Amino acid sequence: MKRVAALLGTLVLALAVTPGAALAADASYRTLSAANHPDWMASVASGTSLSALSIPGTHETMSIHGGSLTQTQEDFGDSGATLARQLTAGIRMIDIRARVNGGNTFTIHHGASYQNANFTDVTNVLSAFLAAHPTETVLMRLKQECTGELGSCTDVSGQKSFPDIFDTYAAAAPGLFWQPSVTRGSAAATPTLGAVRGKVVLAVLHGARGGPIERYGLAQFGSWTDGSSTYIQDNYSVPNIGAIATKRDQVRRFLDATNAGEASKIYVNFGSGSSLFAQPQQVAGGALGVQGVDPFLLIYLGEGHGLTRTGALMLDFPGSGLIAKIISYN
C-alpha cells in the first residue's frame, strides 16, 4: 500500500515532530457506540436505486491495530466484532483490505499490520447481520492490500490468484452476495434496494495497485483506481494539520458534485486522509485548533445547502450524530 509505505519509511522523523492529539469525542467523532440503526433501510422504498441513497460508510473498516498511523476505526473487538458493531450502528458501505495467506485464504490487514481478523470473520458477521435484518444491504469494496513494498505486507507465494480465492469464499457463503456483483466478467448494473435486500453488493474488487479486477462488482466503478476517479473522491494525502482544511473542501465539493451529478450513479466520498504529520484520527477529529472532517460534515449536512443525497460517505472514527445525519437524508 503506497501511502503506508511512505508513512512508515520515515517514522523516526515523525516521532520527533508528532502533531497534537485529536479533539475529544463528540456527536461527530468517536461515538459510534451510541449509534443504533440496524434496520434503517426498512423505511426506504424497494424501488429506490442504490444511487439515490445516502449511505454511512467506513474507510479501512476493520483497521483497529497498528498504532495511530494505521488505526482508522474505534476498537470494538477482534474477529469481526468491530464490523458487527458498525453494522448495528447503521454503516452500510465497508472497505475491506485483504492479504493472500497460506491455504488460499484472506487475512485482514492495513499495510503491514494484521488486524486480528480473517475474511471468514467478515462473511460470518455479514451473514448473521443480514439474516437478522433482511431489509438491509451492505456494499463492499474489497482490495488486495499487499504490494510487497516497505510498510506494506507481502502475499504468501504459491497461492491461487486473488479473484480465485475470493470465488471460493463467495461459493462457501451461498446467498450472501448479490450474484450479479460477484459473477466474473459481468460488471453489474446498479440495482434497486429491493433487488439486494438481505445481500452484500460487491461494489468493486481491487488489485494491489488499485485497478479493478476482471469486471467484478458494479459496471459504473470500472474506472475506480487508486485515489480519486470517476464517481470517487479519495484524495488521501493530507501532508500536515493545516492541510485538513483542504481535505474538508474536497469532501464538500464532492458532496456538491454528487448532487449535481448523474442520478443513476453511486458517488463515493472518502472523508479519510493521513500522513506522518496528520494522522487519521487528526484528519477525522481535528487537531491544534483545526476542524476535522467529521465535525465539519455534521455541521455542513445539518445546514442543508440544498443537498438531496450524500452518496456513500467513507469515514474514519464516525460519531453517532454524523451517522444519524447521513441516514436522515434518506
Image (cartoon, rainbow, N blue to C red):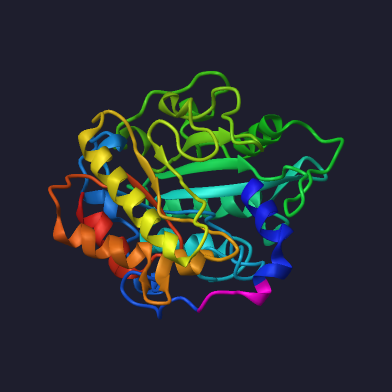
The magenta stretch is 15-20
In the image: residue 275, left or right of residue 41:
right
Is residue 312 toward the left or the right of residue 84 in the image? left
- From the viewer's perspective, is 52 left or right of 67? left
Which corner quadrant of the image does residue 195 belong to?
top left
Res 201 seen here:
yes
Asked whether 136 or 250 is in front, the reply is: 250
Give the residue displayed 53% in from the left and 29% down from the top.
182
Q: Position of residue 73 (x, y in %)?
A: 51, 65
* Residue that protrudes farthest toward the top in the picture: 185
Q: Is 254 in front, or is 94?
A: 254
- Seen from the viewer's position, the closer of residues 123 and 252 is 252
Task: Give percent across and percent down for residue 145.
Answer: 66, 45
The percent coordinates of residue 254 (x first, y second) are: 31, 43
Q: How many marks?
A: 0
**Furthest-left residue in view?**
306
Instruction: Say above or below: 110 vs 216.
Output: below
Regarding residue 73, the answer to whether it shows in the image is no
Residue occupying image coordinates x 29% and y 64%? 296
Q: What predominant SS class does the magenta segment belong to? A: loop
Question: Within the magenta stretch, is there residue 192?
Answer: no
Measured as percent of width and height from the top left, residue 77 is found at 58, 70
Above-or-below relation of 202 to 237: above
Is residue 138 found left or right of 329 in the rendered image? Answer: right
> Residue 146 appears in which quarter of the rendering?
top right
Image height of 271 relative to 172, above or below = below
